[in-house]
Amino acid sequence: MEVTVDVSLISGWLPLAALTLAVAALAAAVGWRSGAWRRQLPWAAAAGVATAGLAGAVLWAAGVLPPGFPVRTFVWGGLAVAALVIAVTGWPGARWPRRLASVVAVVLWAAVTAGAVNAFTGTFPTLGRLAHLDPVDEVTSGQLAAMIAQARTSHRLPGQGVVVTEVIPTPVSHFVTDVAYVYLPPAWFATPRPALPTLILLPGEPGTSADWTASGDADNSLDAFAAAHHGRAPIVVMPDPDGTKTVDSECVNSTFGNAETYLAVDVPAFARRTLGAADGPRSLAVAGLSAGGTCSTMLALRHPGEFETFASYSGFAQPTYQDDDVATSIDVLFGGSRAAFDAHDPTFLLRQRRYPGLAGWFEVGDQDTVPRRAAEALAPAAHAAGIDTCVLVRPGGHDFGLWRQAFADSLPWLAWRMQLTPEPAHVPADCEPGAT
């Protein structure tokens, strides 16, 4: 069973086998003997080329194609359309073996296309991650209660942390949102329970609160860290920053709801009141990937008394609604107010005031053009504004392969900043104190 679960969806025999079978099924679906191929192939080729070309042109014109996006994805997608045309045009006169081959060809080429996208993003590295979209370490409320009782009776900590789902109350923001995921480290089960710091970990856009455990391996990174520190790791709250009214709140208060108030007020209050998290200087940090990285920087700059530590993994320089331009973002998120946009723009905030006592981690892939430029602009500006900065550019793009490593890279530094563990002997980033 483990062999199946651990099979790679990105490289190795499975993607190659899927591609081979897709080619074979498409060849079997064509009516070679009946001569139907003379009618099928021209229409299939025309439809495939037109669809692939149109999709590529539209996405390129919209500016949503990330750097290095594989051209083969459009080729495979075109072949999926071609397989569909062959299935439809050949169905009436075909026998069941050829009909079955045509259906299999459509399914396989669609899977190969999706696999190419997945290989680029690294969202589902193995079959295990695809089969278990929820965290592997997730437990129910009943199981959590049993673990707490067991730990009290045995005076022994569990061997690893757990992930639970929570509906975070929103008495201040009244933000309507989906469930959050919470990682509780082994030390949380101790008696008496230690006051552990809280890390708020944000997904990107589009994304969900499950991304950091389903694709980002945050729970595994935290378990490894806890195992090396006597069960101690931060409590990690992974909320949904977009809510139910949009797929991109940019973590600001807008017509979509009070996302910023939810993240800066309600979520920390929940961690302290319900989870017994620490409440004191440097006990709270925020981090995120992609748009979540932009949110993390913005939240720390707007609420420096609450978030004294932040980390941005492939974040952008400014809040941008669904990859639109600044003008559209101002209209949609800020009611047309440039002043309100500036008040949430890290590039503007870093020019306007100083932030002694804050610390920020910027990590980005060397092939991720726009976020890399953002990090290259924000990190020096943060340093000049008095923020202790760490910068790491590593090989990679805008995908979960980079974000999994970025979180693992920064976790010892984050734990030290939150006064949970001693200063790490080695940090992979280039760190320097803020300019005085």
Image (cartoon, helix red, strand yellow):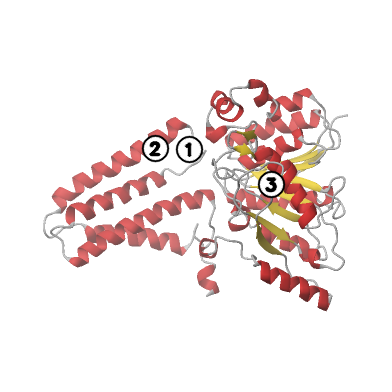
Residue named by callout 3: 170
Disc 2 target residue: 56
Task: Give the CA distance from mark 3 to mark 2.
Answer: 42 Å
Q: Quadrant of residue 189?
A: bottom right
Tell me what residue is drawn at x 82 percent, y 56 percent. Answer: 196
Q: Are marks 3 and 2 in contact (CB under 8 Å)?
A: no
**333 is higher (above) or lower (below) than 92:** above
- Front-most of 326 and 275? 275
Direction from residue 54 to residue 173 in the image, left or right: right
Left or right of 345, for residue 268: right
Task: Decide: few, some or many residues near mark 2? Use Cα within 10 Å; few <14, some 14-19, many ≥20.
Answer: some
Gap in Å between the C-alphas at discs 3 and 1? 36 Å
Figure quadrant of the C terminus: top right
Would residue 9 appear left or right of 240 to someone viewing this image?
A: left
Find the distance from the CA under tag 1 to the CA under tag 2: 9 Å
Q: Residues within 10 Å of mark 1 (few under 14, many from 20)?
A: some
Q: Quadrant of residue 50?
A: top left
**Residue at image point 22% right, 62% down:** 99
Q: Which residue is mark 1?
A: 65
Up/down of 330 relative to 12, above or below: above
Element type at mark 1: loop
